[in-house]
Amino acid sequence: MSILDLEAFEQAPLQRDPCDFVVVPAFVHPQALAEVNRDYPAIEAPGNFPPEDLDYGPAFAVLLQELASREMRMAFARKFGIGLDDLLLQTTVRRFSEASDGNIHNDSRTKIITVLIYFNESWPHAGGRLRLLRNPKNLDDYAAEVAPEGGTLLAFRRSERSYHGFVPCEAERRSLQMYWVKPKRESRDERGPGSLRKRIKRWFKHG
C-alpha cells in the first residue's frame, strides 16, 4: 500500500487566499506514519539537510520515492494548473526547530511550488504552526494556520502574496520540504542588476 494518500490530495480544494494553496491532513497514511518516524533520519542538529546526506530506513526511502514519482508530479501539476515537467525537484529534511526559525518571508522566485509535510504524531505547542499571511508584516493576520503534525501536507504556489512564517518554537519539529524550481540557467537569465545581494540574503533564509 502507498505511504501517501494521493486520492485525498486530489480531492482537497485549491484555496486562493492569500495565494494558491492546499492543505491535506493525513497525507501520510496514519498507519504508515509510525513506520516513517521509525525510519526517520537521525538528524542531530537544527537545519535543513538533503536526503542524500542522511541515513534513514526503508519506510522513509519509500516516502522519498513516492514523492519523486511521475504520478506525484502530474498530480501537483493538475492541482495548481501549471506545467512542472521542465522544473527541477529539490528536497530537504528537518528535525529540529530553534528560536531563530519562523521569521516572515517569501520564497525566492526560482521556487514555483513549495511542499511541506509534517511528521510529528501530535503538536502540543502554541508556536511552530505555519501561517500563510495576508499581511507580510503581521504574523497574526493569516488566512491559514497548519499544525506540524499527523502527516499533514501544505503546498502553495509561490507568488508576491505567498508570505509565511510561524511563532518561534524550540522543539523537535519533523518536516520535509520539497520544491519544484526553475533550472539555474533560466533563473540566472531572469535576475537583473543588484540581484547578487538578494541571492546572498536568500541563502540565509529558512525556506
Image: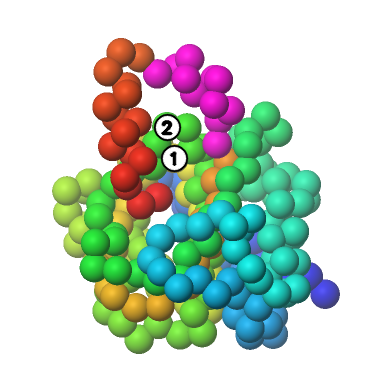
Q: Is residue 163 visible?
A: no
Q: Which residue is mark 2?
A: 109
Q: Position of residue 199 (x, y in %)?
A: 34, 31
Q: What residue do we see at 38% from left, 66% from top?
A: 46
Q: Quadrant of the N terminus?
A: bottom right
Say whether residue 189 is magenta: yes
Count all numbered tags in the image, as a single digit. 2
- Verify CB contact (< 8 Å) between mark 2 and mark 1: yes
Residue type at tag 2:
Arg
Q: Position of residue 32 (x, y in %)?
A: 69, 80
Residue stretch in magenta: 181-191
Category of crowding for the residue at label 2, using alpha-carbon neighbours closer than 10 angstroms: few (below 14), some (14–19), many (at least 20): some
Q: Which residue is mark 1?
A: 158
State the image quarter where residue 40 is shown: bottom right
Q: What residue do we see at 58% from left, 71% from top?
A: 41
Q: Nearer the viewer, residue 98 or 78?
A: 98
Say whether residue 76 is magenta: no
Residue type at tag 1:
Arg
Q: Position of residue 75 (x, y in %)?
A: 70, 49
